[in-house]
Amino acid sequence: MSVVQKAVSSADPVGPLADVIRSVRKLSEEEELFDALPGLVVRLGYDRAIASGVVDGAWAPSAVHVANDVRWARDIREAGRSAPQRLGSGLVEDRMVRTECPVVVRHVQGNPQVNRSIAVVSRSRSYLAAPILVGDHAKGFLHVDRYWRDGAFDRTDAAGLQAVAEAAGLALELMLLRKSLLGGLVDEHGRSAVVTPPRPGCGRPAPSPLALLTPRESEVTAMIADGLTNTQIAAELFVAEATVKSHVKGILRKLGARHRAEVVSMYLRSTCC
């Protein structure tokens, strides 16, 4: 069993990781999601957490949680907001987006690839971070550290934070899907859209694109529609997460979907009748 699978498997129905992921999946607004993430993720054994959003190619903190120090959290957030960092400027966040993987950053105060404004105010020594992705696009980042505790970050820590970041990315995709579906219910004049029923004798309906999927891809698609992240799907199927990512890419290609939210939309339409 892989490290990622062990991390998810250890998250039993009452475990901290499972609780955090369930809480993330209940959030329905983007601002609400980013505000809540730091307070949720520190439940996994961290002292501080930052949730940052990406706007127009630059990222800055949306919310910060520091255990028992609201003022310090505010100072860290304002330091980051005063100097948004552009993606592609050579910081560790670029590597996260490129590899779609979490990173551990050590020797922060002397590291030229970190956000200096945040590093100075936070006085962080080392941290763990993971990207929040929607499709191939970065929507944000999660950064955590153990400022008052000893102990290095291990692979299980990385897998757990990645699972939370994936859950956040999926939540954002579903928000996009809801907006898209609601937008389709009215026309440009604000009137309810009217769907004309097919005329008799028009032939059989076109086959669902889901018919192009293999049995395994169909299984993965159903799990995506149920709100599972890649990490959770890997644990359910007892396969490597890289295998799940390969399945998801194949599903997107066969369905002509840009991201998981469109896959969910197609799946729901094919199963609602």
Image (cartoon, rainbow, N blue to C red):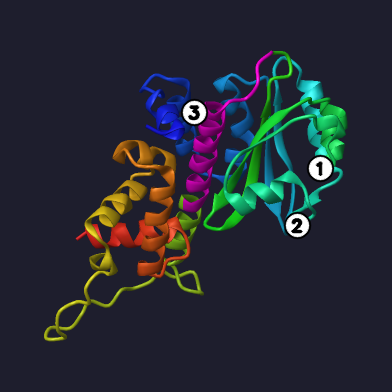
- For the point 45% across and 31% down, the residue is 3
- For the point 32% across and 53% down, the residue is 221
- For the point 75% across and 30% down, the residue is 106
- Return the residue at label 3: 20
Q: Earlier in the sequence, mark 3 or mark 2?
A: 3
Q: Is residue 229 visible?
A: no
Q: Which amino acid type is shown beneath numbered disc 2?
A: Gly
The crowding category of the residue bearing disc 3, from other C-alpha atoms within 10 Å (few below 14, some 14 to 19, many at least 20), is: many
Q: Magenta part of the protein: which range? A: 150-173
Q: Secondary structure at mark 3?
A: helix
Give the percent coordinates (x, y) of residue 178: 45, 55
Q: Nearer the viewer, residue 128 or 188?
A: 128
Q: Is residue 221 visible?
A: yes
Q: Earlier in the sequence, mark 2 or mark 1?
A: 1
- Return the residue at label 2: 88
User: CA separation, marks 2 and 1?
Assistant: 18 Å
Q: Is residue 262 above or below residue 128?
A: below
The mark total stands at: 3
Give the percent coordinates (x, y) of residue 104: 67, 33
Q: Nearer the viewer, mark 3 or mark 2?
A: 2
Q: Which amino acid type is shown beneath numbered disc 1?
A: Arg
Q: Is residue 81 above or below residue 139?
A: above
Q: Which mark is residue 251?
A: none
The crowding category of the residue bearing disc 2, from other C-alpha atoms within 10 Å (few below 14, some 14 to 19, many at least 20), is: few
Tell me, yes or no, whether the highlighted magenta stretch contains residue 113: no
- Return the residue at label 1: 81
Position of the N terminus, as image quadrant, is top left
Q: Nearer the viewer, mark 2 or mark 1?
A: 2
Q: Left or right: 115 with respect to 270?
A: right
User: CA separation, marks 3 and 1?
Assistant: 26 Å
Q: Which amino acid type is shown beneath numbered disc 3?
A: Val
